[in-house]
Image (cartoon, rainbow, N blue to C red):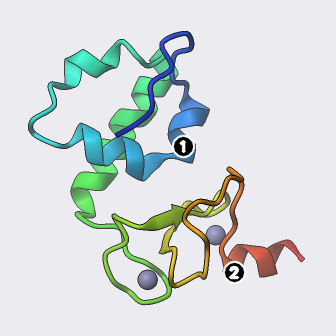
Amino acid sequence: MLAINTNKLISESDVKCIPERVSSAIIDDTIVIGEIKQFFTADGWTAVQKIINIKKQHATWVCPVCSEDASTKSICCNRCLEWSHFVCVRVNKNLKSKQWFCDICKLAAK
Ligand SMILES: [Zn+2]
Ligand SMILES: [Zn+2]
């Protein structure tokens, strides 16, 4: 689940970077949503609620490479926010860098 730094509230920009990590935890019925609200700024919480709505409409995130469910063992592109499996994009899952771009965005950036 999402790493919570109690010294700093989770802001909108943090939420955008980790939509899948946030939403899977939040739409889990076992989590009382009000209990985690305290960890977010007002903007961050608004972003979370948007993500929840999106998540409810699209039950799964699909890997653009293999078209399978990418809700696990996947990495989020920092530009298009698509989730791709580590294996499909040949990324080491221990990648330390927070910035990662899918092939499409890498090509677009050139
Ligand atoms: Zn895949
Ligand atoms: Zn991308």
Residue at figure coordinates x 31%, y 75% from the top left = 69
Ligand 1 image-quadrant field: bottom left
In front: 108, or 106?
Answer: 106
Question: Going by the picture, which residue comes out furthest to the left?
Answer: 30
51 versus 9 height, above or below: below
Q: Residues within 10 Å of mark 2 (few under 14, many from 20)?
A: few
Q: Classify mark 2 as within 8 Å of ligand 2 or not, answering yes or no.
A: yes
Name the side, left or right, on which 27 lies relative to 7: left
- Residue lying furthest bottom in this view? 66
Q: Which residue is mark 2?
A: 103
Query: Residue visible at 9% across and 35% down?
Result: 30
Mark 1 vs mark 2, CA separation in Å: 20 Å
Residue 34: give x, y in percent of width and height: 21, 18
Tell me the amino acid under the disc marked 1.
Lys
Drawn side of residue 34 relative to residue 92, left or right: left
Q: Amino acid at mark 2?
A: Asp
- The image quarter containing residue 29 is top left
Where is 10 relative to 2, above or below?
Answer: above
Q: Secondary structure at mark 2?
A: helix
Q: How many numbered discs sit on the rendered protein?
A: 2
Q: Position of residue 85 (x, y in %)?
A: 47, 75
Q: Are marks 1 and 2 in contact (CB under 8 Å)?
A: no
* Mark 1 burial class by Cα count in 10 Å: few <14, some 14-19, many 20+: some
**Of label 1 and label 2, which has the lower sequence position?**
1
